[in-house]
Amino acid sequence: MRHSADRADGRVEEMQGLHGPFSFPEKLLQKIWLQGLFDTFGARLSDGRRLEVLAPGRWNLLGGPDFRGARLRIDGRETVGDVEVHFHSVDWMRHGHDRDSAYEGVVLHVVLFEPRPGDDPPRTLGGRVLPELVLLPWLHCHLEEFAADDALEVSAQRDAVGLAQPLLELPPLARSACLQTAAAKRWQQKVYFAAVRIARLGWEGACHHAALEILGYRFNRAAMLAVAERLPLAIWRAGLDTATARAAGEPLWRRQGVRPANVPSRRIEQYRAWVARVPDWPERWGQWGTATEFSVPDEELANVATVRQMHGQRAWRERVAGEIVGRAVGGARLDTLIGNGLLPLLAARTGCPVFARWYCGEAGEASELLTKALRLAGVVGRGGAPRHEGALQGMLQLAFERQSV
């Protein structure tokens, strides 16, 4: 069930998620187009023609089409023009674009959902029928995952007190339990999204995509996913030069504001080293699902430090770093890789009970604001638990739920 509504900041679609309804603003759909968070190389239009997005265009936040001057290639033929983005095909006429000369330069209509049978195709004032891309089948992530990521960006604009407010409204002894419940929802979402990815790409493809996506966080996520789409793992095993890999991510690379450790060439070199040292890493990781050391009883989660010690979290992480990743990735990025990629994929494929291992794990990369909010609530830091993945993910889930109200 879904319905549309208009808010002060634009059109919003209400959708049903795993744990209830969530909001999906049209502006977020525009961000997905702008950042190329879909198959920009092999998507197909409604009429079956292949679409390549060479440049998404300039985001127009004033009147007229959403994007100006996009460069597209449709069935090998390049075209330049404007792009309009909507939830539904019929929104083109509902908004009067078929009667507005400002939209005469539109060369592509992008919609999230399939048109209903009998819907008229979008036409310009001059009567030209527009090519249409239904974006949903080509997205790299589930809609709820996009919405949760967007909530993270919104939360980063708040102060720590505002972010911690849902916990501060509870008695101190109830705050950790609230976070654990929220983190469990977040975990279920991650496993669900991982299962969708496996169903679409197969086990090796899903692992390959997830690894490159996480190495690209946050600015070059789309570019790394484009690399994954165009260059399967078999090509990396056979030997792949950095220039070819970088070219596969064009024109999506973002370099401005990217720290030296995250520049595209460095991240590509990391993955080349990883595959060279452990070429069968997806198969090896899948076999870990039968290992008994993954099992950590959920009832022990009240004391994160004790769980880590009792179940050898540090030694287990070292094994992942060496046996699975070939020590090509380390630090907080390794923890992000384990928490956001490897463990959800393993749980989705094998049903291995790894929630507690994930919850008590070392926290991956996250804004300092989240940590500050958790310290204000007294759940991590002095007098609380050590900073851990479950607390951060629980806080993100609370921010997502608060934004969706």
Image: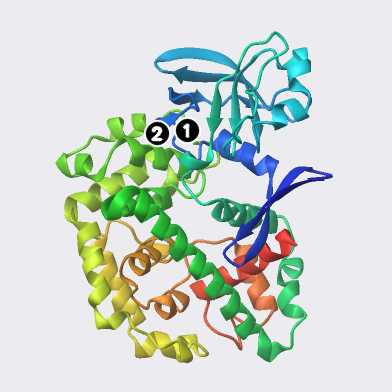
Q: Which mark is residue 249?
A: 2
Q: Is residue 111 above or below residue 259?
A: above
Q: Are marks 2 and 1 in contact (CB under 8 Å)?
A: yes
Choose between 171 and 188: the one closer to the eye.
Answer: 188
Choose between 258 and 346: the one closer to the eye.
Answer: 346
Q: At label 2, which amino acid type do we have?
A: Gly
Q: Is residue 333 visible?
A: no
Q: Is residue 54 visible?
A: yes
In this view, the residue farthest toward the top is 126
Q: Position of residue 247 (x, y in %)?
A: 35, 29
| Residue name at image x 28 percent, y 82 percent | 293
Q: Crowdedness of circle 1 by 10 Å Cα count: few (<14), some, many (20+)?
A: many
Q: Which mark is residue 326?
A: none
Q: At label 1, which amino acid type do we have?
A: Leu
Q: Position of residue 251 (x, y in %)?
A: 46, 28
Element marked by disc 1: loop
In this view, the residue farthest toward the left is 238
The residue beneath circle 1 is 252
